[in-house]
Amino acid sequence: MEAEFLEAHGLTEIAKCDLAPPTDIEDELMFDVEDVETHTDDFEEAYLTLQESSHGALSHSGPLAIKWLEADAPQTRQTLRALKKLRAEGQLQAELAHANVLSACGAVMNENTFSGILMPFLEGGTLAAALRELRAEDRVLSEQERAIVALAVAEGLLYLHWDMSIAHLDIKAANVFLEAPLQQLLAEAEQRKPAAGFRIADFGQSRYLMPDQKTLDVDQDRAADLHMAPEMGSASRVSAGADVWSFGVLLWELLEMREPGQEDMCGGRPTIPSTCEPAWASLMRWCWEPTPRFRPTMAQVKFELRAMPPRPAAT
């Protein structure tokens, strides 16, 4: 079971660690893999009870999360490819500094060779899990609460697109992490505090966009999912507009309190329920424009969200 789990996720994993977190997020911290194993609770069994991500799993306690290759992983072509991809992800994530983006704060080294990424552990789990829990209790988010969450994610994407020239390419509720329970974050935002605490994570699919480049190469071997823009399955070059499409699906997730399934799809996009507010439905449709250049920018998305009644608190 363990080998199958690791192979299915590119031989990577995330485990909990009680090493002291950095005092400065910009610090370049290097931890030896033996130190990590020493400070990890029951590491050998950890990934059997973890919450899955696209390349591993995330534990439910500890100040730092560790996304890494096993120290004794066999040196196969698949392992080396996964390590190269993980290193690129860590280098990209280490450059990020925004309240709505999860940054890397260090690296795990194995005999002076990069082996994994250290990042702040966020105790609130994923937005997707929080939505499922509320749905199980027959609870839904109000339009204002949805706008608070959507604005936080939009702020993070706007930073990635405009400040860092990065396309995330895997935006969904499962890749938005919470610093605290969702209801606590919403209550703080409603008290006109900044909508912090929502962080975009998992940059394994992300790509840089050069200043004079409108499109970028993407992997063609990644499994298709219902959050992906249609051009990602048919073209080797896509734009940051792919994130806008996926953001529209995230808006649907906030509305329906769950991930979309095949039964929800019509014409390659989730069906909008008839009870949806007109402004929310209109924004989703705009994000799902078939031609990427006709989709809104994240700056336009942010403007539309702020214009929705009742308006969420300013950030």
Image (cartoon, helix red, strand yellow):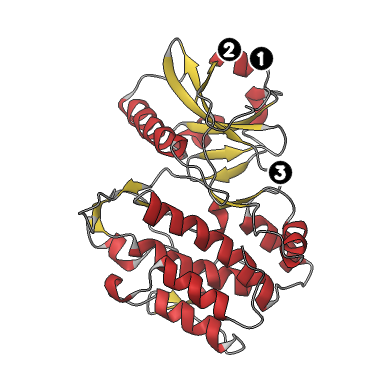
Comparing 219 with 4, the one in front is 219
Comparing 146 with 115, the one in front is 146
Label 2 packing within 10 angstroms: few (<14), some (14-19), many (20+): some
Front label number (1 vs 3): 3
Q: Where is residue 125 in the image (x, y as percent from the top left)?
A: 67, 48
Q: Return the mark for residue 315.
A: none
| Residue 86, placed above or below residue 252 | above
Asked whether residue 304 appears in the rendered view, the answer is: yes
Query: What residue occupies the far top of the structure in this picture?
Result: 111
CA–CA distance in space, label 3 to label 2? 25 Å
Front label number (3 vs 2): 3
Nearest to N terminus: mark 3 or mark 2:
2
| Residue 83, placed above or below residue 33 | below
Contact between labelled residues 2 and 3, with CB atoms less than 8 Å apart: no
Find numbered disc 2 in the image and state the secondary structure of the residue it sits on: helix
Circle 1 residue: 38
- Give the amino acid at mark 2: Glu
- Give the amino acid at mark 3: Glu
| Residue 264, placed above or below residue 68 | below
Find numbered disc 3 in the image and state the secondary structure of the residue it sits on: loop
Q: Position of residue 141 (x, y in %)?
A: 70, 72
Find numbered disc 1 in the image and state the secondary structure of the residue it sits on: helix
Circle 3 residue: 123
Q: Position of residue 212 (x, y in %)?
A: 20, 54
Circle 2 residue: 34
Q: Residue at x 58, y 39 (%)?
A: 57
Q: Which residue is drawn at 39% across and 51% down?
A: 163
